[in-house]
Image (tube, grey):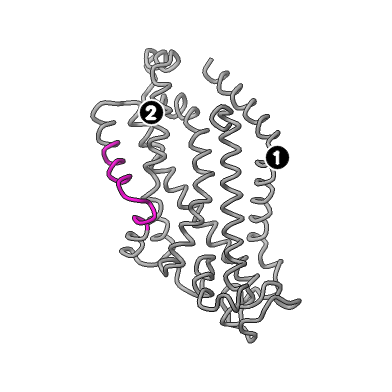
Amino acid sequence: MAMSQLNNIKTSSYQRFLSDKAGLFSLVVIIAILACITFAPWLTNHTDQGLGTPGLDRLMPPSSDYILGTDSLGRDLWARILYGGRVSVLLAVLVVALALLIGTPLGIIAGYFGGWIDEIIMRVVDIFLAFPPLLLAIFLAAVLGPGLFNMVLAIGLGWWPWYTRIARAQVLSYRQRPFVEAAEFMGVSHTRIMTRHLFPFVGSPVLIQSTLDLGSAILTVAALSFLGLGLPPPTPDWGQIISEGRVYFPDRWWYVTFPGLAIFITALAFNLLGDSFRSSVDPDRGS
């Protein structure tokens, strides 16, 4: 009965999403961005410059040779943005994945068992939520030092509590349903109840939040890179490119404008997609 209800919800949500033009458009934009950064070597004639090799034409404006201009080391900005997108998007995905892996199981455990287990988990959540995520990420990144793993850890540790609260709220709303009580009466293990009977109802709100967080994660990754707390040069990164180009603005406007547009468009597309998912799953809240 519970699975039939869940399937009906998924079908209606899918139909509502297909009728949302903004959601479909944002999905197309995201697919196009992912395709560009995936096939970067085939979309530029300056692959070596995209990976950090200096060029000869420093601070050249957009032209037929360099469609987005060049940076202070003569590197093609289009190539740098393509390869920088790989780093920025990968970091954002890893950050959200880490937050999901930590926060969702803890939320399910807290909501299912309740009592002192719930109390301990939620007090730890409150401690982390007492600090603004960006400030916590800056502090941890400064302490841990530069590096991909350290950057993911610094941002992800500030975001997992939100997934714990979402998962816990969903589990609490289904904890006393007849299908859960029936499973417990038949002697089904706690692990199986949480993974097979409760987790499917947690998936939708967690997916919506993770989609919204991808845009925020890209902005946070760019912010840390801009402050010099990201990956060390010459690894390209959108925030790092803006940081390098800020001293040449506004005379060399293309240096910061195009990577800024890349961040803006990508973050906006993920936010619109997340809003569309939320409206599809919960039309009343979405409106």
In the picture shown, does residue 186 fall above or below 220?
A: above
What residue sits right under mark 2 in the picture?
191
Look at 42% across and 33% down and name the residue there: 167
C-beta proximity under 8 Å, tags 2 and 1: no
- Helix, strand or loop at disc 1? helix
Q: Which residue is depicted at the point 30% across and 64% down?
A: 143
| 10 drawn magenta | no
Residue 74 falls left or right of residue 154: right
- Residue 171's tag is none
- Alpha-carbon neighbours of circle 2 within 10 Å: few (<14), some, or many (≥20)? few
Disc 1: which residue: 21
**Of discs 2 and 1, which sits in the foreground?**
1
Residue 90 position in % (x across, y down): 53, 57
Quarter containing the C terminus: top right
| Residue 174 locus on image (x, y percent) | 43, 21
* Neighbourhood count class around disc 1 (C-alpha, 10 Å): few under 14, some 14–19, many 20 upward: few
Report the residue at 56% width, 46% height from top: 271
**Residue furthest left in the image:** 116
* Quadrant housing residue 266: bottom right
Amino acid at pointer 2: Thr
Q: Which residues are magenta?
A: 122-137
User: Which quadrant does the N terminus fall into?
Assistant: top right
Point out residue 59 in the picture as x, y percentages from the top left corner: 61, 81
